[in-house]
Image: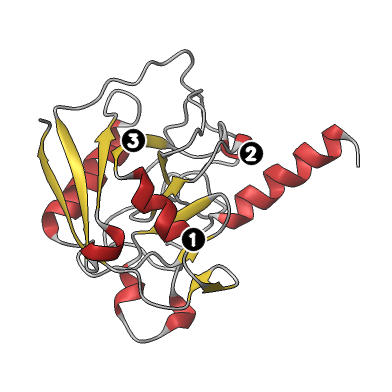
């Protein structure tokens, strides 16, 4: 397989990998959204701290947030965290590239709807940038519509070129990446963890 064909397959795979069946955006676009060029992320004065139900195994994960890059997605993430929407959700998707969470559907007893849900708020428009999906980047999951991000998010386990310019980057793990890798190494069937990996809460607090 030549390099061009390989890159094309990577992009196709990555798009299907992170899709979620949220309600369609009222501001849907058939073309690729504008991409912010040469943007330098500036960390907010608040961080998001993910506290896990099984803290002994999965610890805490601290994320710095980039409102200058993706103000709408950061605002949504903070809003949902402060409202407790993320309390009790699971990391429902794990693969060599990412761990993914943020779906309220994972709180119920029906595993077949995991990854298909979102909050009751409108979808968030794409805020693409030329930042690279390096290890520990936090991105907004979406459906086929570029403007269908809602509540779900993912954390990259490694450099993932196929995601560049195709998903909104809104933060980065600054502490607890070892726990991200632990979650990424959990036993699974397909991409679904065999045991619940549950978020206790996500707290938005001042950066120390």
Give the alpha-carbon distance from disc 1 to disc 2, as whole Å.
21 Å
Helix, strand or loop for disc 3? strand
> Which circle, 3 or 1, is nearer the viewer?
1
Task: Please state, as top left, top right, bottom left or bottom right, where the C terminus lies in the image.
Answer: top left
Q: Is residue 140 above or below residue 64?
A: below
Q: Quadrant of residue 171?
A: top left
Distance Cα–Cα, label 3 vs label 2: 18 Å
Mark 1 element type:
loop
Instruction: State the residue at coordinates (45%, 55%).
Output: 99
Q: On the image, numbered disc 3 is attached to which residue?
A: 171
Question: Is residue 17 rendered to the left or right of residue 205?
Answer: right
Q: Is residue 135 above or below residue 152?
A: above
Q: In the figure, is residue 29 to the left or right of 121?
A: right
Task: Give the residue number, with chain letter if any, for mark 1.
Answer: 185
The reply to whether discs 3 and 2 touch (Cβ–Cβ < 8 Å) is no
Q: Give the residue furthest to the right.
A: 1
Residue 94 drawn at (x, y percent): 50, 61
Which numbered tag is attached to residue 134? none
Q: Which residue is mark 2?
A: 162
Q: Quadrant of the N terminus?
A: top right
Question: What crowding class fits label 1: few (fewer than 14 Cα within 10 Å), some (14-19), or many (20 or more)?
Answer: some
Q: CA distance from mark 3 to mark 1?
A: 22 Å
* Mark 3 / mark 1, whichever is N-terminal: 3
Secondary structure beneath dot 2 equals helix
Pick whichever of labels 1 and 2 is earlier in the sequence. Answer: 2
**Residue at x 43%, y 67% (from the top left corner):** 92
Mark 3 Cα shell of 10 Å, populated few (<14), some (14-19), many (≥20): many
Q: Is residue 168 above or below residue 80?
A: above
Q: How is the image coloured?
A: secondary structure
Which-is-in-front pick, marks 1 and 2? 1
Name the residue rendered at 27%, 57% in the picture. Answer: 121
């Amino acid at each position: 397989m030549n390099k061009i064909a390989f890159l094309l397959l990577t992009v196709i795979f990555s798009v299907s990998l992170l899709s979620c069946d949220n309600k369609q955006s009222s501001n849907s676009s058939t073309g690729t959204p504008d991409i912010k060029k040469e943007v330098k992320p500036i960390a907010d004065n608040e961080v998001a701290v993910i506290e896990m139900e099984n803290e002994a195994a999965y610890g805490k994960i601290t994320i710095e947030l980039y409102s200058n890059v993706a103000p709408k997605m950061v605002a949504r993430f903070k809003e949902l965290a402060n409202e407790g929407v993320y309390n009790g959700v699971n990391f429902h998707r794990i693969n060599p590239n990412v761990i993914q969470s943020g779906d309220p559907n994972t709180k119920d007893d029906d595993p077949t709807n995991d990854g298909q849900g979102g909050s009751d708020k409108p979808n968030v428009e794409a805020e693409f940038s030329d930042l690279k999906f390096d290890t520990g980047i936090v991105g907004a999951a979406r459906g086929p519509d570029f403007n269908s991000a809602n509540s779900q998010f993912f954390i990259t386990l490694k450099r993932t070129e196929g995601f560049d310019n195709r998903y909104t980057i809104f933060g980065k793990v600054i502490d607890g990446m070892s726990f991200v890798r632990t979650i990424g190494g959990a036993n699974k069937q397909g991409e679904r963890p065999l045991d619940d990996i549950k978020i206790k809460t996500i707290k938005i607090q001042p950066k120390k």
